[in-house]
Amino acid sequence: MKTTWRWISKSALLMLHDESLAEHGGGEGVRDEGLLDSALARPLNVMAYSDSAAPPDVATLTASYGVGLAKNHAFVDGNKRAAFLAVGLFLALNGWRLQCTQAEATFTMLAVASGDLSEDAFAGWLRLHAARRTSLTQASLP
């Protein structure tokens, strides 16, 4: 069955980044629009150039967002935070959620940004820490 992905819009990421800066501080603004556009296009390129017999899974596409945003440094400040927010948003848009502690998330994003954790390894980490969300219609409500 072919999956129809819901991608992250630039406006949504900019809004999340602004909210993160308002809460945690940091320099405002986009340092390089081209690098931001490139990071947002990474997972679409992964999808477009993948083997149709073995298309990328949610972890591969999510890792592509995370690595692209963490390493491109498109923002003046808050690049790792923006990367982590994009990871959570892409998972949520596509029916998944991240299950990890704040310490695990921080350690992992620092490793991604420094290059100590490869994109493939990050995708593997996401496979261990992402779970399908239960829809409200499936959940047993009181």
Image: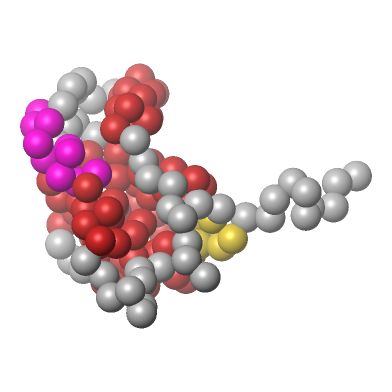
Left or right of 115 on screen, residue 78? right
Image quarter of residue 110: bottom left
Question: Would residue 76 be seen by someone viewing this image from the given angle?
Answer: no
Residue 29 magenta: no
Q: x, y (%) of residue 108?
A: 32, 59
- Using the image as rendered, state which of residue 13 and residue 57 is in the foreground: 57
Whether residue 104 is visible, yes or no, is: yes
Q: In the rendered view, tell whether residue 29 sits above or below residue 109.
A: above
Q: Residue furthest bottom?
A: 53
Question: Could you say which is closer to the camera, residue 106 or residue 50?
Answer: 50
Q: Residue at x 17, y 32 (%)?
A: 75
Residue 124 coordinates in the image, percent (x, y): 36, 72
Image vertical order of residue 82 relative to residue 49, above or below: above
In the rendered view, does 3 fall on the left or right side of 120?
right
Q: Residue at x 32, y 27 (%)?
A: 11
Viewer-proximal residue among 45 and 131: 45
Q: Is residue 54 left or right of residue 94?
A: left
Q: Does 3 appear above or below 75?
A: below
Q: Which residues are magenta?
A: 31-40
Q: Quadrant of residue 123?
A: bottom left
| Residue 23 percent location from the top left of the image | 39, 23
